[in-house]
Image: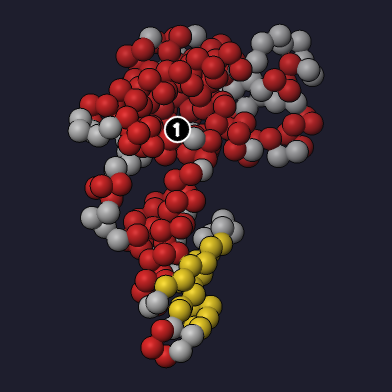
Amino acid sequence: MDDTLLKIQEKIGYTFNDIALLKLALTHSSFINETQRTEHNERLEFLGDAVLELQISQTLFHKHKTEREGVLTSLRSQMVNEKKLASLAKKLFIGQALYMGKGEESQGGRTRPALLADAFEAILGAVFLDGGYEKSQEVIMTLFKQSWPEPASHMQKKSYKTLLQEYTQAQFHFTPEYQLISEDGPEHAKIFTVSFKDSQGYFVTGSGNSLKKAEHEVARLALEYYQAD
């Protein structure tokens, strides 16, 4: 068996009874155009998306018993989005294991977030078919154990700067730094403008009537950006 297939099974904590399902989950549609295969992973992606959403929704429902539907929906969207799923896919070495056409690969398909996220969901669909719902639950809980967000009411016990630092250290392994861009206005009514740039190239500015408030505004805007992705 391919080492990458073994590695993926080890990472998700599940060994397939039918390894063909895992291979199908890793087969991009571009691959069948250059081979004799007739199936690709889009149907498994459809199934995996439903399994993932149900499990995440069920856990949030029980985890936050007093929160309303809107809050639960927001929390789920922070967990089940292309950026998050692609990040998890990279940790599982899915990009290296994908079966894809040479054209797609030459255009960077192995690192494309949408493609990685789709394959991640397809693997969950394959686990569901191979081992049933309980096994897919176990896999999802293992993969997302460090990813459960808190409602805004809980998060605001911490400052935006603290929350941003926790996020960037966890996702990008760096500590945020803020740069003063300008000070405008008279001495008694100055407006400070600062900027923040992450290791991925995202850049944002914010203003306030003190340097501290300007930094907190930048941190708030950055967190909104990350949570929307």
Side of 35 where 75 appears, left or right: left
Asked whether 174 or 204 is in front, the reply is 204
Side of 163 where 95 appears, left or right: right
Could you say where residue 107 lies in the image, as x and y percent from the top left? Answer: 75, 38
Asked whether 154 or 83 is in front, the reply is 154
Side of 45 where 75 appears, left or right: left
Any part of residue 96 in sight: no
Determine the residue positioned at 41% across, 70% down. Answer: 215
Q: Quadrant of the N terminus?
A: top right
The relative height of residue 222 versus residue 107 in the rendered view (above or below) is below
Determine the residue positioned at 23% across, 26% down. Answer: 62
Could you say where residue 90 lies in the image, as x and y percent from the top left? Answer: 52, 38
Using a 10 Å C-alpha cutoff, classify the residue at mark 1 as few (fewer than 14 neighbours), some (14 to 19) or many (20 or more).
some
Quarter where residue 108 is shown: top right
Quarter where residue 2 is shown: top right
Could you say where residue 192 lies in the image, as x and y percent from the top left? Answer: 46, 78
Residue at label 1?
80
Q: Amino acid at mark 1?
A: Val
Determine the residue positioned at 39% across, 53% down. Answer: 167
Give the SS element for disc 1.
Answer: loop
Asked whether 23 or 45 is in front, the reply is 45
Side of 229 where 26 appears, left or right: right
Determine the residue positioned at 49% across, 51% down. Answer: 225
